Image (cartoon, rainbow, N blue to C red):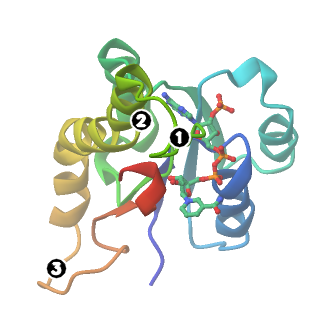
Amino acid sequence: MSPRTVFITGSNRGIGLGLVRELLKDKEIETLIAGARNIDAAKDLQDLAKSDSRLHLISVDVSCDESLQKALKEIEGLVDDRGLNLLINNAAICPPYRTIDPPNRAVVLECLNVNAVGALVTAQLFLPLLRKAAAHTPGSTFSASKAAILNVGSDSGFA
Ligand SMILES: NC(=O)c1ccc[n+]([C@@H]2O[C@H](COP(=O)([O-])OP(=O)(O)OC[C@H]3O[C@@H](n4cnc5c(N)ncnc54)[C@H](OP(=O)(O)O)[C@@H]3O)[C@@H](O)[C@H]2O)c1
């Protein structure tokens, strides 16, 4: 069974945009919410949303609590009683950084802030919506059709 409601961060390009395209092929998904830092510039997402009313675009910066809170409010309205079945923490940065280069604490901290803390805080904020979705699905089996958080990451991304 597929999730009914999905939210994915950092979905205006790269793997996130690819995931949006793939998820839209699943007709059992009722509401797909694509997050991007700059919705106005997200032309590919806008084109997809024009041809599929299940796709909703919201502005979100995972390094900003205020932005996350605003996104949460919007998403609560979109999913309503269904809650959120699947949160995909995809947003990340990976600036060039090599151990042999001069140290740059600011770059490392920004990576940790976006890639690790951003995913953690997003998961914490959306937990009530995930719990709401889980309550609709009987049984104890773990699955994205019940409620799940998918963290996309890599060693070099610190997450
Ligand atoms: N590509 C790879 O080879 C690879 C390998 C292993 C793991 N991964 C993981 O896969 C995921 C996606 O990677 P990708 O290659 O698709 O990266 P990408 O092309 O650089 O895309 C990153 C996405 O994250 C968004 N983003 C960056 N900072 C953000 C923030 N503070 N708040 C919200 N969104 C933010 C970007 O938005 P903007 O357009 O606004 O910058 C963009 O949409 C990442 O988690 C990465 O660690 C990638």
Residue 11 screen position, x and y as percent: 63, 44
Label 2 with label 3: CB-CB less than 8 Å: no
From the viewer's perspective, tell me whether residue 44 is left or right of residue 105. Answer: right
Name the residue at 30% across, 50% down: 83
Q: Quadrant of the N terminus?
A: bottom left
Mark 3 within 8 Å of ligand 1, using the beta carbon: no
Tag 2: amino acid: Cys
Which residue was labeled with disc 2?
111
Circle 1/circle 2 CB separation < 8 Å: yes
**Residue nearest the viewer, comparing 112 with 50:** 112
Asked if the residue at tag 3 contacts the one at tag 1, i.e. Cβ–Cβ closer than 8 Å, the answer is no
Mark 3 crowd level (few <14, some 14–19, many ≥20, 10 Å Cα): few
Nearest to N terminus: mark 1 or mark 2: 1
**What amino acid type is highlighted by mark number 1?**
Tyr
Mark before the other along the chain sequence, 1 or 3: 1
**Mark closer to the observer (2, 3):** 2
